[in-house]
Amino acid sequence: MLKKKDMLLIADSGSTKCDWLLYRNEKEVPIKIRTKGLNPVILSRKALKKNIVSNEELINYKEFVTSIYFFGAGCGTDKNKHKIEVVLMSIFNNAIVTTKEDIMAAVYATTTKPAVVCILGTGSNCCFYNGNTIEIKTPALGYLLMDEGSGNYFGKELIKAYYYGKMPKTLELLFIKQFNLKEKYIIKKLYNSLTPNKYLAEFAHFLFENEEHEFIKNILKEGIDKFVNHHVLQYKGELKTVPLYFVGSIAYYAKKYIENSLSRKGLKAAGFIRRPINNLANNLSEAHTWSSVTSI
């Protein structure tokens, strides 16, 4: 039984999923936890809280957590940071909560020195880290207008290709078999769902499962080229002197398309990280001040 409380909880949340690491003390291996994504832009406080309290491990330790570092999609404004903080503090009522946007998690997971860092997951983003703060030249207006090269971007491209009759027959048969493509169902998921971006991103798996097909290769190439042209090249001045990193599941699986697109622009990526939580946690746990904690 735990007798003292001084636990560290670190969260890296996208719109689809949230990875948590719970440090009971500085010696033990942290507990890895995964919940649904916690994006304050698209979820109400009630829905955010439900996604957290539905996890038994988080609730079992809630009284013992004293520090929370939460990095999340949609946490780029004070209003949304406050929304997340209120929810977290209502559950972990002994904790001090630090909230930052997900791009900072990507930065901390890749470097401690100046760099350009990109996220390609359910959504997409890109920033310049000067060693202390980040600079974002292109605003993140989300899945409706931007998010080029992301999971939800590719989901939209696949659905449009299917409905416009542009998808080759062999792929179309596979697509029909894998997804519910009834018009009413798709409209309901897009316009009545709390997480339409998450729904769209689910289609991205189809791309990498059928990557050998030329039609799929073209979709991936075009999407990645758009991200590089609209986002990465905003930092071409900075990239003359600093490295470029990519973080996220789409970045990981689309690595060769990213490398090819960058090569055509005379650029090169310094590294790819699929899940930033472990690298991020190492940096934060080392900086955390521990007091004596009695193990279980």
Image: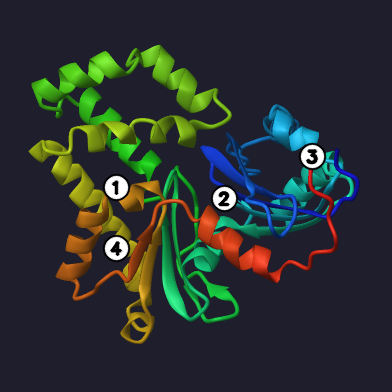
Secondary structure of the residue carrying numbered label 2: loop
First in sequence: mark 4 or mark 1? 4
Mark 1 against mark 3, which lies toward the viewer? 3
First in sequence: mark 3 or mark 4? 3
Across and down, in percent, residue 134 comes to: 55, 73
Instruction: Place residue 283 in its image quadrant.
Output: bottom right
Visible residue check, residue 181: yes
**Dot 3 surroundings within 10 Å: few (below 14), some, or many (20 or more)?**
some
Q: CA distance from mark 2 to mark 1?
A: 20 Å
Residue, disc 3: 61
First in sequence: mark 1 or mark 3? 3
Seen at 34% across and 53% down, the residue is 251
Residue, disc 4: 228
Left or right placement of residue 50 versus residue 136 in this view: right
Instruction: Give, as a three-letter code, the residue at label 3.
Output: Tyr
Instruction: Give, as a three-letter code, the residue at label 4.
Output: Val
Asked if 189 appears above or below 107 in the picture, the reply is above
Secondary structure of the residue carrying numbered label 1: helix
Residue, disc 1: 253
Across and down, in percent, residue 232 comes to: 34, 68
